[in-house]
Amino acid sequence: MTSSLITPSRAKRDKPTIGFVNLGCSKNQVDSEVMLGTLVAGGFQLTGDARAAEVVIINTCGFIEEAKQESINSIIEHGRLKKAGSCRVLIAAGCLAQRYQGELLKELPELDGVVGTGEFGRIAEICKSLLAPKVRQQRLWLGQPPYLYDAETPRIRLGAPHSAYLKIAEGCNRNCAFCAIPIMRGKQRSRPIESIVTEATRLAQEGVRELNLISQDTINYGVDLGLRQGLTTLLRELVTVDHVRWIRPFYLYPQQVTDELLELYAGEARITKYLDMPLQHISDGMLKRMHRLGDRKHLTRLVERIRTKIPGVFFRTAFIVGFPGETDAMFEELKQFMVDMEFDRAAVFLYSDEEGTSAVDLDRKVDRAVMEERRNELLAVQDSISAAKNRDHVGQTLEVLVDGISEESNGLLEARHEGLAPEIDGVVYCESGTARPGEFVSVTVTDVAGYDLIAQQVGRAAVTVSSASPSLLMPKKAGAGYR
């Protein structure tokens, strides 16, 4: 996800101006929201015109090669504002900054500061220190990750006013061979349940009706706090928060999935019947080389168990193709698994060597062209499956959450049913109706358009909200490959 800030124009001119660019995932978005809130509380004003900003901050992503290159390109692009705009200070923050630290300062001399993932809470102080000297000096701020905000931390939310991401933990204790997240984010650290519920309550009071729970390893929430069944315990508390209609946990690792958790999903109306569980592969040989727990037998039974326990569940997963050692036979096994399991959505990523991970040293690398061909084959399989599942909705009446006027056409409303997460799963286009953003309405599906549905509004649902103020920022939808 790539985003740049749009802010209200009312601001005192005597305050230093900040331009902000958010790159990467929803977890990065929350970090950006926290930094923005901290900056405003610290005496800065925000501007949507980067040319007018005295300080420009790029919240970078360092997850895979394409994301790293996007971050570097953004730094270079905004570095030109030191000559063509008002920029005095250019800062790289976030994952790429944490991972490459001094290398960024050396290779990108336009940078004034690098702020790692452990220093977000000091961003206002850092900006002031970089603005103060008359003689320019590049500096690093690299505290130990992970920084973890709490319910009292200032936060300026980006995106739709009625939908919010709520970070429940930071870091990861897993040892997946391909993943650099523990390098950039550190070991898992969970927020206390009380802090999360307090923030959820405040968000609901501000008009949020959909809470999207995020972390690197959501199924493992609370283990570091000594909690057993931590996610289940947290969800039982969150469903008591007034005015929240949908609670959607993301990123469930395919281990530690208890019957108690699945029964809570099935029996609690406020928890969306939506599972986001990256499986990464299905070949036993690949799973072992990836350092993933479980095998094909376990994963197959798990998917079947989830579908039995939660009738009608929308199942999203993710796979990696081209991991070192992936043979044609292993790939064909994965493709047949996708055909057999008929997931609602599946992201497909190309493997890339990530410095510091154990996979870098593995033999039998797969050519890029072969990886791309394999990804295209899997996406074609998923396109067919998702299209068929969408056609099953034609004639059905669904409850949807209205997001607003569609970017595709001013004559259409854009909405989502509970099986469609923001930004990544497609939308429901409503051809008639006058519902406002944040309202729940009933629609009848009339047609299918790829990953999207076409529908007509037939009534308002029992839960409605008032129209909210315009958002500061509407993130772009995730790119191709994550479907």
Image (cartoon, grey):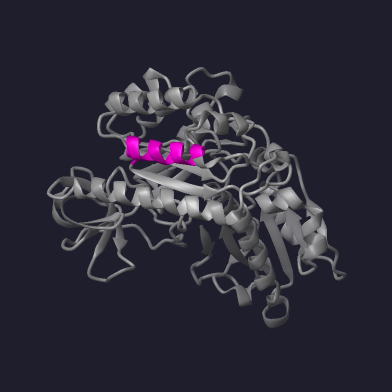
Residue displayed at 57% across by 70% down: 47
Magenta-colored stretch includes residue 34: no
Would you place residue 203 above or below residue 84 in this image? above
**Quarter where residue 187 is shown:** top right
Q: Is residue 131 visible?
A: yes
Most extreme residue toward the front, as rendered? Answer: 329
Whether residue 185 sits left or right of residue 223 in the image: it is: right
Image coordinates for residue 207, horizontal then vertical, percent: 36, 49
Q: Is residue 191 visible?
A: no
**Please, what is the dominant secondary structure of the magenta stretch?**
helix
Whether residue 226 sits left or right of residue 295 in the image: it is: right
Image coordinates for residue 69, horizontal then vertical, percent: 64, 61
Residue displayed at 56% across by 30% down: 285
Whether residue 7 sits left or right of residue 98 in the image: it is: left
Would you place residue 122 above or below residue 129 in this image? above
In magenta, the rendered stretch is 329-343
Image coordinates for residue 439, horizontal then vertical, percent: 25, 52
Would you place residue 263 above or below residue 387 in this image? above
Most extreme residue toward the right, as rendered? Answer: 135
